[in-house]
Image (cartoon, rainbow, N blue to C red):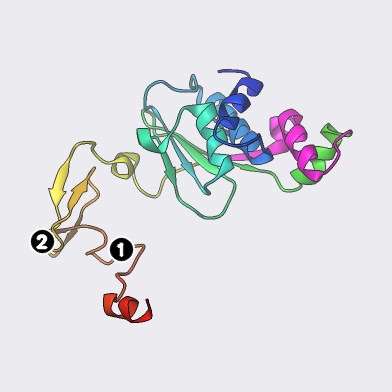
């Protein structure tokens, strides 16, 4: 694995500057590599990362692990938590890692010359030992990893709306192949177009 400072340089290329959450994401990814005994950042697709928030934290995870949404090795399950689960897709071992309570205050002990809280966290998070910075726990996924990832390249058509569904994400409902939207599992609702036109 690259050293932390190199991972942070990689992560910062996606932002105007390096921030404390990028550091946490990189540290979480580095610990996952150690606990799962994987050589990261990966060049294959063995590791799946499931982040519980989006933003800077995820960029740190990507820099450390080589897991990206575009490679289908990173998923966002947005619980609003700075935490992530890492799954070895070969062994199905999974570890959830999150920052420990109180690390914002602890950061000052590792950055006594910091000018403000933000700088204390930025510097401190790079130096606090893993066992004081992070909590981790072995977990089991609620959905099998193979079902979560699906089969790349598989395509079916929703029998209700006619849209294509890829990667085994279809839902069987009363013998019909449906997309999640048509099966009632959507994250959106269709707007009433006449209402939109009237208010425009």
Location of residue 35 in the rendering, given as x and y in whole percent from the top left corner: 55, 28
Q: Which sits in the foreground, 114 or 36?
A: 114
* Helix, strand or loop: magenta stretch: helix
| Image quarter hosting the N terminus | top right
- Residue 194 got which mark? none
Numbered range of the magenta stretch: 113-137
- Residue 175 got which mark? 2
Residue name at image x 29 percent, y 70 percent: 190
Mark positioned earlier in the residue sequence (2 or 1): 2
Determine the image quadrant of residue 59.
top right
Mark 2: give few (<14), some (14-19) or many (20+) Cα within 10 Å. few
Q: Which sits in the foreground, 8 or 172?
A: 8
Q: Name the residue under label 1.
A: 185
* Residue 48 can be seen in this image: yes
Marks 2/1: CA–CA distance: 17 Å
Location of residue 140 in the rendering, given as x and y in whole percent from the top left corner: 44, 43
Q: Which sits in the foreground, 147 or 127?
A: 127
């Amino acid at each position: 694995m690259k050293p932390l400072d190199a991972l942070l340089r990689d992560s910062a290329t996606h932002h105007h500057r390096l921030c404390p959450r990028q550091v946490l994401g990189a540290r979480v990814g580095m610990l996952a590599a150690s606990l799962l005994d994987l050589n990261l950042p990966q060049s294959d697709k063995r590791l799946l990362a499931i982040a519980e928030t989006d933003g800077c934290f995820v960029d740190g995870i990507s820099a450390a692990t080589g897991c990206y949404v575009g490679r289908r090795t990173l998923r966002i399950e947005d619980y609003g938590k700075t935490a992530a689960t890492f799954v070895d897709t070969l062994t199905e071992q999974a570890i959830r890692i999150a920052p420990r309570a109180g690390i914002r205050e602890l950061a000052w002990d590792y950055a006594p010359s910091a000018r403000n809280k933000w700088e204390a966290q930025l510097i401190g998070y790079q130096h606090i030992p893993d066992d004081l910075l992070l909590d981790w726990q072995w977990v089991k996924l609620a959905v099998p990893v193979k079902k979560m990832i699906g089969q790349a390249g598989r395509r079916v058509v929703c029998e209700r709306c006619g849209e294509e569904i890829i990667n085994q994400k279809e839902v069987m409902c009363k013998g019909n192949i449906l997309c999640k939207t048509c099966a009632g599992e959507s994250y959106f609702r269709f707007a009433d177009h006449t209402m939109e036109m009237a208010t425009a």
